[in-house]
Amino acid sequence: MKNVERPSLWKEPASREVTAQQQQVGYPRMVGYVAGYAPGTGMNGYVAGVDPATGAPVLVPAAHAMAPHHGHAAGGHPIHSPPWRPMNAPGSPPLGEGHVQLPLTAETFGGSWGNTTGGGAGAGTTIIFSGRPQKPYKTSRLIVRGTKSGTTAIGNLIGQVFVGTDLQQGELGNSDLESLGAANAFDTWVSYKQAEPGVWIRVQATLTAFPTGTDFETYTIMLIGHYLH
């Protein structure tokens, strides 16, 4: 049987055989998880096909319907299968995918600049916010929240995001993380490299201007992304 390449989930599909969910802008799928596939349906189970010898209609496993059989391509409408069919066994669900948050923890100074007598970072300091997902994780949104106290607390959070050692932007230089990660920001979804279990996701951050005296700025950073479970 001739091998036929499956359509990539990371490219815009050339046909309608990739589900609408996989095509949805801003929500790429995880590597290592592909929903049950049947041409034109994205469903598990069986599809209606044709016996190449007799031309009679037969049920063809969806996984096999991708490839031509002896010059005849299987096709047709999906056949309804038992509700437990997508499971490994009745009552045992298969690998799934969630959309969950991942908090990043400030490694130093509690994520705070200014008020150095109270434990905040001094002017020019870079603070690293980091987290290690326990299962494959692909970031789709960055959430940054800052608390600013005092008249000199006017700086914006800037920096760079890394997945492992890979910089997640198109060029070197600090990005405006506070604008990108604002809770009310519009159309600021991202598609960072997938982090495998134990790989560090880090944000190296600093400010555009530093508070003085007892004034301070404190930040929290959280990611939202796809997670295998």
Image (cartoon, rainbow, N blue to C red):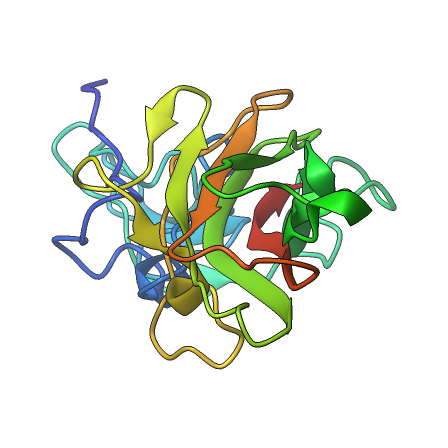
Q: Quadrant of residue 106?
A: top right
- The spot of residue 184 in percent (x, y) is 49, 81
- The quarter of the rendered structure image containing the N terminus is top left
Q: Residue 149 versus residue 33: which sits nearer the camera?
A: 149
State whether residue 14 appears in this view: yes
Identify which residue is drawn at 53% across, 50% down. Answer: 44
226 over 72 or under it: above or below: below
* In the foreground, 219 or 35: 219
Relative to 61, 208 lies left or right: left
Say if residue 34 shows up in the picture. no
Which quarter of the rendering shows the C terminus? top right
The residue depicted at 37 percent of the width and 40 percent of the height is 160
Horizontal and vertical percent for residue 116?
70, 45
Residue 164, percent from left and from top? 46, 22
Say how many tags the image has. 0
Q: Residue at x 33, y 49 (%)?
A: 49
Residue at point 55%, 62% (across, down) = 143
- Image coordinates for residue 123, horizontal then vertical, percent: 50, 43
- Foreground residue among 109 and 171: 109
Q: Say above or below: 158 vs 180.
A: above
